[in-house]
Image: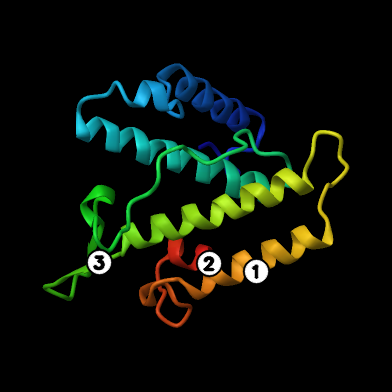
Amino acid sequence: MYALLGFDELGLQYTIKAFEIAEQLGLFDPAVHSTIESQKERRVRELSAWALFSYDSLYRYMFCIPPLLHTPPPYPLPDPITSPKWYGELQVKYSMDTDNFSTYFSLLFKAKAEMCVIMNEISMCCFTESGIPTLSLKDLTSFNSRLESWFNSLPNSLHPHNIVLPGQIMLQ
């Protein structure tokens, strides 16, 4: 995603093109997804769909514009504790140490995706094409409750006193 989070003139065109390609590939279409026989290809498609949805939700929320996707991908994300291989893993090795350290990518990806689902719904209410928000007090209370629940359910490795990597900090 180009330059200022993909929302400059050229970057926006690349983002729109990414969604056009996703549409052509049927990335968000369960009917197309069900025809994919390779488990590896299904996983790649699911992860890509969630990454694109999360990107769109997060940054369009930050720029106060309506999201391109109105609903999350139709594929549930697996539990990163019981299915960490679904997500893959990133490890870092510091030059003065002999051990590799986990970045907890699976936990971060799932937590971010769950947050982006809520942010997408907030954006749908606040940043409409007409410019008139449709957010009620009941909606605000519900979103607040859901965000608090999301935050309180973060795994220990993503609690504010344990985070150190930029992606983890951005989650907070």
Q: Residue at x 54, y 57 (%)?
A: 115
Q: Residue at x 65, y 44 (%)?
A: 60
Q: Earlier in the sequence, mark 3 or mark 1?
A: 3
Q: Front-most of 102 and 93?
A: 102
Label 3: which residue?
102
Q: Amino acid at mark 2?
A: Trp
Question: Which corner quadrant holds the C terminus?
Answer: bottom right
Q: Earlier in the sequence, mark 3 or mark 2?
A: 3
Provide the secondary structure element on which disc 2 rests: helix
Q: Percent from the top left, x then y, of residue 80?
A: 30, 59
Q: Is residue 155 left or right of residue 41?
A: right
Q: CA distance from mark 3 to mark 1?
A: 31 Å
Q: Front-most of 159 and 3?
A: 159
Q: Against 152, is 126 above or below?
A: above
Q: Against 80, is 22 above or below?
A: above
Point out the frontmost of discs 3 and 1. Answer: 1
Q: Amino acid at mark 1?
A: Ser
Q: Percent from the top left, x then y, of residue 133?
A: 84, 47
Label 1: which residue?
145
Q: CA distance from mark 3 to mark 2?
A: 22 Å
